[in-house]
Amino acid sequence: MSKCEHHPGRNADGDTSFGKKFCTKCAEQIKKAQSSVSSHVNPKECFIIYKGGATGWETFYGTGCAHWVAHQRGIKYGFSSDKCALGYSIKVPDVISGAHKIENRAEVRTGDIWVNDKSIPDHCGIVVKVESEGEKVKISIRHCSSGQGGVVTNDFDAHWSGKGKFYRR
């Protein structure tokens, strides 16, 4: 019989999740952690981490936007403690790690990553539409928003007052 991914002394008689096999205790903790993931987070199933010890499996808090962007763009940078159960980044700095900063708004393209204008950015999204209106460039950004209840698209100027930085992978 297979052994649990995190407890080699236990049989993997629980569910298989994330392509791995787990003991009954882990399987129960995984389901409990998944049920406590905030409703706005997308995808939810993997927004959990194994903490070990008596803690077991827990949900992450407050980084749903980076998690969504990482899944959309296949980004898996950062420490294992900063990745979801499927290995995708959950922190904004990790999502833009190694990406090229775009200095000129006129060079922004669909697929670029936007981050808010904080010294340590804590919100991000993906450029989904760029339209030229004369000399003005209109940019639409899709992001996972706790305040708006999930994945939404907002106008860069109207929603963020044209503030933030853009990066390209």
Image: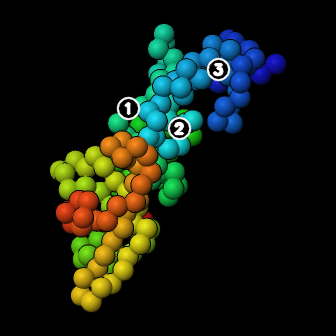
Sequence-wise, the earlier of marks 2 and 1 is 2
| Residue at numbered disc 3 | 27
Q: Residue furthest right?
A: 1
Q: Secondary structure at mark 2?
A: loop
Q: Are marks 2 and 1 in contact (CB under 8 Å)?
A: no
> Hey, what amino acid is under mark 2?
Lys
> Hey, what amino acid is under mark 1?
Tyr
Q: CA distance from mark 3 to mark 1?
A: 21 Å
| Residue at numbered disc 1 | 61
Q: Name the colouring of the figure.
A: rainbow
Residue located at (40% from left, 43% from top): 149
| Residue at numbered disc 2 | 44
Picture mark count: 3
**Numbered label attached to residue 47:** none
Can residue 113 be seen here? no
Q: CA distance from mark 2 to mark 1?
A: 12 Å
Can residue 124 be seen here? yes
